[in-house]
Image (tube, grey):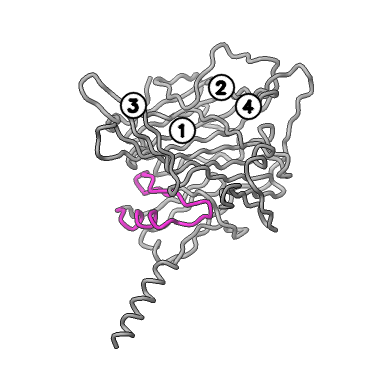
Amino acid sequence: MKYKFIAIIYLFTLNSFVFSQEIRDQLSNEKISFVEIYSDKGDLIGVTNVGGVFPIDLKNKIKSSKTEKLAFVNSFFETEIIETKDFNDRAVFKMNPIINELKEVVISPNKDKNQYLVLKTYVRSLQINNGKIHYFMDGIVEYYISLKTKKVKIKFISNRSFENKSIKQLKEKGLTKIFFQITGAPMLNEFLNYNNLIENYNFQKTDLEIKITSKDDNSVKGNLFTNKNGTNLSLGFITNDKPKVMKGLGIENILENYNINSFFSASNSEEFGFNALMYFKETRNYKIKAKKDIEYQKVDVTHEVFVLDYRFSEEIDAKKLDQNYSFTKSSSYSEEYWEKVNNVLFQPLAEPIELFIKENLIELK
């Protein structure tokens, strides 16, 4: 009896470790990388990994949360809402893709004197501190990309800026305040280009995808999916097991996760680049604290770029340029640009996020 009892405990424990939960495409059944999980209050609980799997720590956070519903958010799929009470009983969750038919658009300069590719975009950015949205910013941004050096510069044409005044800064004492703000227009990543990507990573081709692996240890870092609609790139640079620790100016900053998700209209994976970019998303997860503090703040940031139009220019024709990841402290717009975003991949923010912003953030004017 004793041995049987031990065996039962062993099998139960083994089963709890083996039971894997993942999110897949409803149509292709492929795993979906980097799906964001939100509570019904708009709090970010966590993000699935590059393989579409719920890590153990994320599952524990979901189980310990008080939310009644979970929102699964990925820019290429319709937001999926499930009851939290049903989460433990399912091994696989399905999401419906939003892409149907896209016209391939890859543009090339037609004059030698053109020096820049200019992307007109709609950008939106969220910063979440300890699960609560702290800053939200969106706007119309032009990206100037040098055809020679590929260096990128930006200019905000219009913007809205919102802040949750109830959330304290990293450190507030007397006249001393330490801010951690990374909300704003993101830098377009250098790996949004096939040649840069293949130069720095190994490719493993299968029938359905190209797995992107590290040249150091051959670990899977991301994937490329190509079909008649275009090419989807998912890539993780930093993960929990190998965080990046940064110290300076009285702040300790640990970057635990950093990944990107992007879509290109090029149906040939070897042709993707800035001139075919339709969508870009960047997600970062930090732990930060002032030098003398004991507890860390958890800071999660997402940036999205929806390309609206392309043009070429002989020069940077904007009078004053802006900085990446820079929060503008006042709104500036003449029309409601956010009401109609002309990009087939655009989706409104998930309902819990929109509701939280409406009820808890104020627009800075």
Query: Regarding mark 1 in the picture, which secondary structure is present there?
Result: strand
Residue 325 pos. (x, y %): 47, 27
- Residue 154's label in the rendered image is 2
Residue wearing tag 1: 125
**Label whose residue precedes the other's in the sequence (3 or 2):** 2
What's the CA distance linking mark 4 and mark 1?
18 Å
Q: Residue furthest front?
A: 216
Q: Amino acid at mark 1?
A: Ser
Check the picture and name the quadrant holding the C terminus: top left
- As for residue 20 lying within the magenta part, the answer is no
Residue nearest the observer in this picture, 46 or 220: 220
Mark 1 surroundings within 10 Å by alpha-carbon count, few (fewer than 14), some (14 through 19), many (20 or more): many
Range covered by the magenta-colored residues: 37-66
**Label whose residue precedes the other's in the sequence (2 or 4):** 4
- Considering only vertical position in the picture, is 31 above or below 247? below
Taking the image as shown, residue 186 lies to the left or right of residue 269, namely: left
Residue 43 pos. (x, y %): 36, 44
Residue nearest the observer in this picture, 144 or 81: 144
Residue wearing tag 3: 179
Check the picture and name the quadrant holding the N terminus: bottom left
Residue wearing tag 4: 119
Q: Nearer the viewer, mark 3 or mark 2?
A: 3
**Label whose residue precedes the other's in the sequence (1 or 2):** 1
Query: Regarding mark 2 in the picture, which secondary structure is present there?
Result: strand
